[in-house]
Image (cartoon, rainbow, N blue to C red):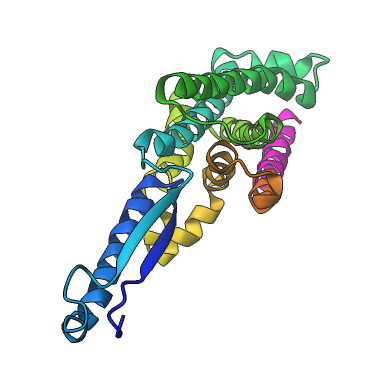
C-alpha cells in the first residue's frame, strides 16, 4: 500500500446467522476503508487513480444472506420444544384434574409404562412436525439439506427427548392444566425464543445471560441443526452440542422420574 500498489483482501464470513454475517461484513468494509484512507494521501502521488485497498466479501453457507435460511432452523427448534413440552405436561396433568390418576396408581400399570404411554406418541408427533416444517422450507424457501439425514434425526431426537422429559417434570409440579401451560410457556417458550441465539446473538448478550444460555437446550440444537442443514458437516463438528443435549435429557428425565416415583408411592 505504501508503494502505491492495490492489494486485494478476501473476507470470509460464516453466513449461517444472517444477522451476524451482515454486521460482520459492515465492520469488515469499514475497517478496510479506514485502513485505505490512512495511506491514501501519501500514496496518491504514486498512483492517484482508484482506491488503495479493495475487499471482496464472500459469505459461506448462505451467500445471499437470506433470512429464511436463518429463521427456519430456529422455527423448528421453537415449534418442537413447544409441542413436546406443552403436550406432555398437559396430558399428564389432565389425569389429575379429572381424577383418574388415583385409578391409574391402583392399576397394574407402573410409572415407567405410564410415562412411556404418555410420551412416546408425542415424541413421534413432534418429530413428524419437525420434518414437515423442514420439508416445507425446502419446498417453499429452497432450504438446502447438505448434511446427513441420520445425523439430523439424531440431533432432533435428542432434543425432543429432553423436551418431553421437561414436560414430564412440569407435570409433577403443576396441579392444573392452566398452571402447567403457563409454566411450559415461561420455562420453554421464552428461553427458546430469547436465549437460544434464534433471534438475538448470544455474543451480544450481557455476561450473566450468556451464562444462562448454557442451560437452554435449544442453543445446542440450533448449532447442530444449522451445521447439518446449512454447512453439511458431520457429528464430529458439533459432538459437544450433542453431548450437551444428551446430558440435559438424562438429568431432566432423572429428576422427573424421581418426583413421579415419589408421587406414585
**Number of marks drawn:** 0
Left/right of residue 157 with respect to residue 126 in the rendered view: right
Residue 241 percent across, percent down from the top left: 63, 49
Q: Is residue 39 above or below residue 139?
A: below
The front one of 182 and 157 is 157
The main secondary structure of the magenta stretch is: helix
Which residue occupies the extreme front position in the image? Answer: 46
Rendered residue at 58%/30% (across/down): 171
Residue 29 percent across, percent down from the top left: 28, 63
Q: Is residue 67 above or below residue 110?
A: below
Quarter of the picture containing the C terminus is: top right
The front one of 34 and 117 is 34
Quarter of the picture containing the N terminus is: bottom left
Left/right of residue 15 with respect to residue 30 in the rendered view: right
Among the 4 quarters of the image, the one containing residue 56: bottom left
Among the 4 quarters of the image, the one containing residue 34: bottom left
Rendered residue at 67%/41% (across/down): 249
The front one of 118 and 155 is 155
Left/right of residue 231 with respect to residue 22 in the rendered view: right
Among the 4 quarters of the image, the one containing residue 98: top right
Residue 17 percent across, percent down from the top left: 42, 47
Q: Is residue 23 above or below residue 79?
A: below
Residue 158 percent across, percent down from the top left: 67, 37
Residue 43 in sight from this viewpoint: yes
The residue segment tinted magenta is 248-265
Left/right of residue 32 with respect to residue 77 in the rendered view: left
Q: Tell me if residue 192 is in the magenta stretch.
A: no
Residue 205 in sight from this viewpoint: no
Rendered residue at 71%/50% (across/down): 236
Amino acid at each position: 500500500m505504501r508503494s502505491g500498489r492495490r492489494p486485494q483482501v478476501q473476507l470470509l464470513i460464516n453466513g449461517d446467522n444472517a444477522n451476524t454475517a451482515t454486521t460482520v461484513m459492515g465492520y469488515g468494509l469499514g475497517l478496510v476503508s479506514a485502513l485505505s484512507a490512512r495511506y491514501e494521501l501519501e500514496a496518491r502521488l504514486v498512483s492517484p487513480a482508484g482506491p488503495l485497498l479493495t475487499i471482496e466479501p464472500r459469505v459461506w453457507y448462505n451467500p445471499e444472506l437470506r433470512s429464511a435460511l436463518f429463521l427456519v432452523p430456529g422455527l423448528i427448534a421453537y415449534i418442537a420444544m413447544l409441542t413436546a413440552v406443552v403436550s406432555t405436561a398437559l396430558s399428564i396433568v389432565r389425569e389429575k384434574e379429572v381424577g383418574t390418576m388415583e385409578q391409574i396408581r391402583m392399576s397394574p400399570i407402573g410409572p415407567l409404562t405410564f410415562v412411556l404411554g404418555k410420551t412416546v406418541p408425542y415424541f413421534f408427533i413432534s418429530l413428524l412436525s419437525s420434518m414437515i416444517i423442514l420439508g416445507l422450507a425446502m419446498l417453499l424457501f429452497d432450504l438446502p439439506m447438505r448434511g446427513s439425514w441420520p445425523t439430523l434425526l439424531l440431533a432432533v431426537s435428542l432434543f425432543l427427548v429432553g423436551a418431553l422429559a421437561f414436560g414430564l417434570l412440569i407435570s409433577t409440579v403443576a396441579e392444573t392444566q392452566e398452571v402447567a401451560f403457563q409454566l411450559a410457556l415461561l420455562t420453554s417458550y421464552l428461553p427458546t425464543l430469547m436465549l437460544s441465539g434464534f433471534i438475538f446473538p448470544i455474543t451480544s448478550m450481557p455476561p450473566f445471560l450468556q451464562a444462562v444460555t448454557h442451560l437452554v437446550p435449544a442453543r445446542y440444537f440450533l448449532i447442530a441443526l444449522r451445521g447439518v442443514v446449512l454447512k453439511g458437516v458431520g457429528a464430529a463438528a458439533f459432538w459437544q452440542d450433542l453431548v450437551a443435549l444428551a446430558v440435559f435429557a438424562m438429568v431432566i428425565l432423572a429428576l422427573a422420574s424421581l418426583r413421579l416415583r415419589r408421587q406414585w408411592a
